[in-house]
């Protein structure tokens, strides 16, 4: 199965996002604007079928959360420490749910 990954660096609406940590489907991105640090975003990357008009040949594409999913699949933090704490909490949730399912 061919998967198109979320880019390590991306731009959106004048902001630049740079991935600084990723484990599985969890990632932390640094958000800057005009070279100045703005926030850190913790995201749960999901997968989707590609747009049928795409000619890239991917079976699945990774998707960065969009605005309606903020607070469910994405969170913003003013400090890296806050982002890392959320990241670790989400990792712990995943670990707990996997051990309960096993």
Image: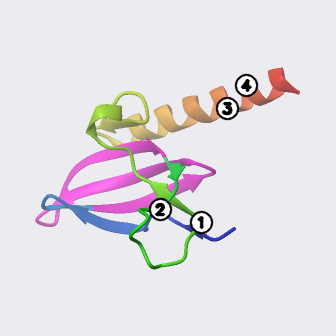
Residue at (32%, 46%) from the top-left corner? 40
Q: Quadrant of residue 14?
A: bottom left
- Tell whether label 2 touches label 1 (CB within 8 Å): yes
Q: CA distance from mark 2 to mark 3?
A: 26 Å
Q: Residue 12 at what x, y percent from top left?
A: 21, 60
| Mark 3 closeness class: few <14, some 14–19, many ≥20 residues within 10 Å | few
What SS does tag 3 mark? helix
- Tell whether label 2 touches label 4 (CB within 8 Å): no
Based on the picture, tell me whether residue 41 belongs to the magenta stretch: yes
In this view, the mark in front (1 or 4): 1
What SS does tag 2 mark? loop
| Mark 4 closeness class: few <14, some 14–19, many ≥20 residues within 10 Å | few
Q: CA distance from mark 1 to mark 2?
A: 7 Å
Residue at (31%, 37%) from the top-left corner? 77
Q: Residue 52 at what x, y percent from top left?
A: 44, 65
| Mark 1 closeness class: few <14, some 14–19, many ≥20 residues within 10 Å | few
Q: Which mark is residue 50?
A: 2
Q: Residue 98 at what x, y percent from top left?
A: 78, 30
Q: Earlier in the sequence, mark 2 or mark 3?
A: 2
Q: Which residue is mark 4?
A: 97
> Magenta segment, which residues?
17-44
Q: Quadrant of residue 33?
A: bottom left
Q: CA distance from mark 4 to mark 2?
A: 29 Å
Q: Main secondary structure of the magenta part?
A: strand
Q: Which residue is mark 3?
A: 94
Q: CA distance from mark 1 to mark 4?
A: 27 Å
């Amino acid at each position: 199965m061919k998967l198109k990954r979320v880019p390590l660096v991306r731009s959106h609406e004048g902001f630049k996002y740079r991935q600084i940590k990723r484990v599985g489907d969890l990632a932390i991105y640094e958000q800057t604007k005009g070279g100045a640090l703005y926030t850190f975003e913790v995201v749960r990357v999901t997968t989707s079928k590609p747009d049928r008009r795409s000619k890239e040949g991917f079976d699945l594409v990774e998707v960065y959360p969009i605005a309606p999913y903020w607070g469910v699949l994405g969170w913003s933090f003013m400090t890296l420490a806050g982002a890392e704490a959320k990241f670790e909490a989400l990792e712990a949730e995943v670990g707990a749910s996997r051990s309960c399912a096993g």
